């Protein structure tokens, strides 16, 4: 075991929080197994051997966006070929398909559309809920909530309470990218600042909604930027307790405008997931988003401190437009197989991280329900 892993292990065994300098040294260390083992220990103490997943469906209602983030292959400018906006009946059809397939969650995000009014989003929310009362809706990142406040000229607090009144159940963790200004100005100069993302997220939590937090890594950022990003999240979590899961997003480089960035390799991804598990002591869940990681790395991550595999997804555009070679969809049987073969117990959860069903762990005769 390397010196830094031994040092961090001692802090953890004494119930101490690790410092930013510790996290940076872990990133600089080559002791992948030492880091992974420690992360697995931290995770086991928090979550036992259970690995969570949900039956969900992603729904990206538009790819038109007034921001043109350099890492994004999904966004289209007004009038550009390949741009689309689903109408309400297309959205309802997709929600109905999700309901019929047993999904408990719709994950809805989209570009910052140049023309749609805030009323469109309110109607979308209300109509989906009216037609699918059991379905939980996880929608709109802090970036979108901020944009809705601008276009409606309403305070952010009111945007949140209106959406919540009409059926919003939680918000996803997108738009965080790297929160530090220097990197943010390079990769997404038009997007709201990191401070604003944190401010809006705090309002989301204070408005009674839980959210997630992502981190886009493997482009131009340095390890220190990742640590700074996680430090800002840990600080906000101390204040609100409103984050459910931390989700490192492995950068996919195709069709983007970040020259020479290749995206992280497998070692970097495993290390990043493991260090986040060790550092973010006030986050209950670390999610391996298989769409960006690829299924094999996401499965191996279950031995490196991860306890959430996201869900069935069904239709994914943001990662795949940028070259992700993962499938569009995983069925429940495949998710169960992946978790069981990692020696873990699959647990289906809902949006609020309540258990829907605990499945049997792997059995010797290979028979499962
Ligand atoms: O905000 C955009 C990222 C995010 C690329 O909260 C890219 O449960 C990699 O936030 N390569 C959207 N990533 C996805 C997201 C998410 C996904 C799954 C679960 C949850 C959750 C949230 O995708 C964007 C941006 O950070 N992104 N382009 C790219 N080329």
Image: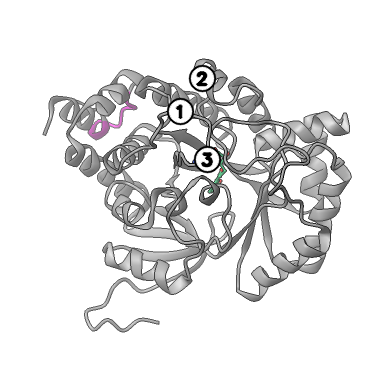
**Residue to which mark 2 is pinned:** 180
Question: What residue occupies the far top of the structure in this picture?
Answer: 182
Secondary structure of the residue carrying numbered label 2: loop
**CB contact under 8 Å: marks 2 and 1:** no
**Location of residue 202 (image quadrant):** top right
In terms of depth relative to the viewer, which is nearer, 293 or 172?
293
Range of residues picked out in magenta? 12-18
Secondary structure of the residue carrying numbered label 1: loop
Q: Main secondary structure of the magenta part?
A: loop
Q: CA distance from mark 1 to mark 3?
A: 10 Å
Mark 3: give few (<14), some (14-19) or many (20+) Cα within 10 Å: some
Rendered position, 165 above or below 363? above
**Residue to which mark 3 is pinned:** 255
Residue 86: image location, x then y, percent: 77, 56
Q: Is residue 14 magenta?
A: yes
Q: CA distance from mark 2 to mark 1?
A: 20 Å
Q: Quadrant of the C terminus?
A: bottom left
Q: Is residue 330 magenta?
A: no
Residue 146: image location, x then y, percent: 73, 31
Q: Which mark is residue 259?
A: 1
Mark 2: give few (<14), some (14-19) or many (20+) Cα within 10 Å: some
- Give whichever of discs 2 and 1 has the lower sequence position: 2
């Amino acid at each position: 075991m390397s010196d830094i892993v031994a040092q961090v292990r001692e802090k953890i065994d004494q119930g101490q929080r690790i410092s930013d300098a510790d996290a940076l040294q872990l990133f600089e260390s080559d002791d992948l197994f030492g880091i992974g083992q420690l992360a697995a220990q931290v995770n086991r103490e928090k979550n036992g051997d259970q690995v969570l997943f949900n039956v969900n469906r992603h729904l990206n209602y538009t790819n038109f966006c007034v921001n043109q983030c350099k890492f994004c292959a999904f966004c289209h400018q007004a009038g550009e070929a390949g741009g689309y906006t689903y109408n309400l009946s297309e959205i309802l059809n997709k929600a109905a398909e999700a309901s019929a397939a047993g999904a408990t969650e719709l994950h809805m995000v989209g570009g910052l559309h140049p023309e749609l009014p805030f009323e469109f989003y309110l109607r979308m929310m209300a109509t989906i809920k009216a037609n699918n009362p059991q379905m939980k809706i996880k929608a709109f990142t802090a970036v979108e909530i901020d944009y809705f406040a601008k276009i409606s000229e309403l305070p952010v607090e009111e945007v949140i309470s209106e959406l919540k009144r009409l059926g919003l159940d939680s918000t996803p963790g997108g738009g965080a990218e790297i929160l530090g200004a220097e990197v943010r100005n390079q990769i997404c100069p038009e997007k709201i600042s990191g401070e604003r993302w944190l401010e809006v997220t705090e309002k989301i939590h204070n408005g009674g909604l839980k959210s997630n937090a992502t981190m886009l890594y493997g482009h131009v950022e340095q390890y220190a930027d990742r640590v700074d990003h996680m430090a800002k999240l840990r600080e906000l979590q101390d204040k609100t307790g409103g984050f459910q899961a931390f989700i490192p997003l492995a950068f996919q480089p195709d069709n983007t405008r970040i020259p020479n960035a290749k995206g992280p390799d497998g070692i970097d991804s495993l290390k990043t997931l493991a260090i986040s598990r060790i550092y973010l002591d006030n986050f209950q869940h670390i999610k391996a988003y298989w769409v960006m990681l690829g299924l094999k790395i996401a499965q191996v991550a279950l031995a490196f401190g991860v306890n959430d595999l996201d869900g069935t997804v069904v239709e994914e555009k943001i990662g795949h437009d940028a070259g992700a070679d993962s499938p569009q969809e995983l069925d429940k049987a495949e998710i169960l197989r992946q978790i069981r073969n990692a020696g873990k117990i699959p647990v289906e959860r809902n949006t609020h991280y309540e258990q829907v069903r605990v499945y049997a762990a792997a059995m010797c005769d290979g028979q499962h329900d």
